[in-house]
């Protein structure tokens, strides 16, 4: 078996309507579908929900569940807020910076652009507390080949030492990154 693609990724939201409107306004995601049930189809458990689906481009779907009878949303307190996030690719720096301006104009804090050598990103939170990243790819074929060549060595070294391997340290020095 080979995975064809991700059918959808689902998160919880506080308010389905607010979430649809926010993603439409700031990220131009169209509202595709709503499903609402009183019982969970897979388990039969009584748990009313609204399940919304948003077009994330090129057949990708971002979905959310509003669960009004459940305890308020929380997050994993043992994981830093920067770790769990959804990264979305945009076509250009101009698009990314225009989105940053729209977000900031409405009082939404935005970090970046951050230069990761092979892509540049901005970071912000949606109204549900989910961290989002917008990214523009900037890597060259040579950069990607160099990273591909060391991925297993890096992973194996990490598995043994739990210390950051230095095989790709060139990404963090702008002079070295410009060589590729």
Image: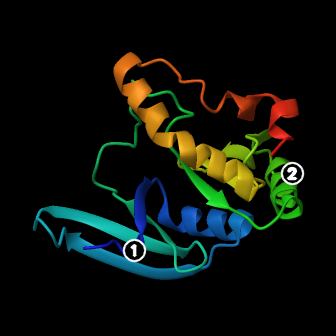
The x and y percentages for residue 160 are 35, 21
Disc number placed over residue 31 in the picture, else none:
none
Question: Is the N terminus in the top left, top right, bottom left or bottom right quadrant?
Answer: bottom left
Q: Can I make out residue 133 in this image?
A: no
Instruction: Name the residue carrying label 2.
Output: 105
Could you say which is closer to the camera, residue 73 or residue 110?
110
Q: Earlier in the sequence, mark 2 or mark 1?
A: 1
Position of residue 99 in the picture relative to residue 46 (left or right):
right
- Picture quadrant of residue 64: bottom left
> Mark 2, mark 1: which one is toward the viewer?
1
Task: Report the Cα–Cα distance between label 2 and label 1.
Answer: 33 Å
Q: What element carries label 1?
A: loop
Q: Is residue 117 above or below residue 55?
A: above
Does residue 77 lie above or below 84 as drawn? Answer: above
105 on left or right of 46: right
Instruction: Give the percent coordinates (x, y) of residue 165.
Output: 54, 24
Q: Which residue is drawn at 60% across and 53% down?
A: 87
Q: Nearer the viewer, residue 156 or 30?
A: 156
Residue corresponding to mark 1: 7
Q: Mark 2 and 1 residues: CB-CB less than 8 Å, in contact? A: no
Q: What element carries label 2?
A: helix
Residue 144 image point, x, y percent: 66, 52
In the rendered image, residue 41, in percent from the top left (x then y), is placed at 17, 73
Q: Is residue 97 visible?
A: yes
- In the displayed structure image, the side of residue 58 where residue 99 appears, left or right: right
Mark 1 surroundings: few (<14), some (14-19) or many (≥20) residues within 10 A: few
- Vertical order, 117 against 46 (above or below): above
> Dot 2, crowdedness within 10 Å: few (<14), some or many (≥20)?
few
């Amino acid at each position: 078996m080979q995975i064809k693609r991700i059918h959808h990724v689902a998160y919880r939201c506080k308010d389905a309507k607010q979430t649809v409107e926010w993603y439409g306004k700031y990220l131009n995601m169209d509202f595709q579908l709503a499903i609402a049930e009183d019982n969970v189809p897979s388990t039969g458990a009584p748990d009313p929900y609204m399940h919304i689906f948003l077009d994330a481009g090129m057949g990708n779907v971002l979905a959310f569940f509003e669960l009004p009878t459940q305890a308020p949303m929380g997050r994993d307190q043992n994981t830093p807020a920067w770790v769990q996030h959804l990264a979305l690719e945009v076509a250009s720096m101009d698009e990314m910076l225009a989105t940053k301006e729209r977000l900031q104009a409405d009082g939404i804090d935005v970090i970046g652009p951050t230069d990761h050598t092979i892509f540049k990103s901005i970071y912000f939170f949606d109204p549900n507390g989910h961290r989002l990243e917008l990214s523009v790819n900037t890597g060259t074929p040579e950069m990607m080949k160099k990273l591909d060549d060391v991925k297993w060595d890096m992973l194996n070294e990490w598995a043994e030492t739990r210390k950051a391997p230095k095989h790709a340290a060139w990404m963090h020095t702008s002079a070295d990154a410009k060589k590729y």
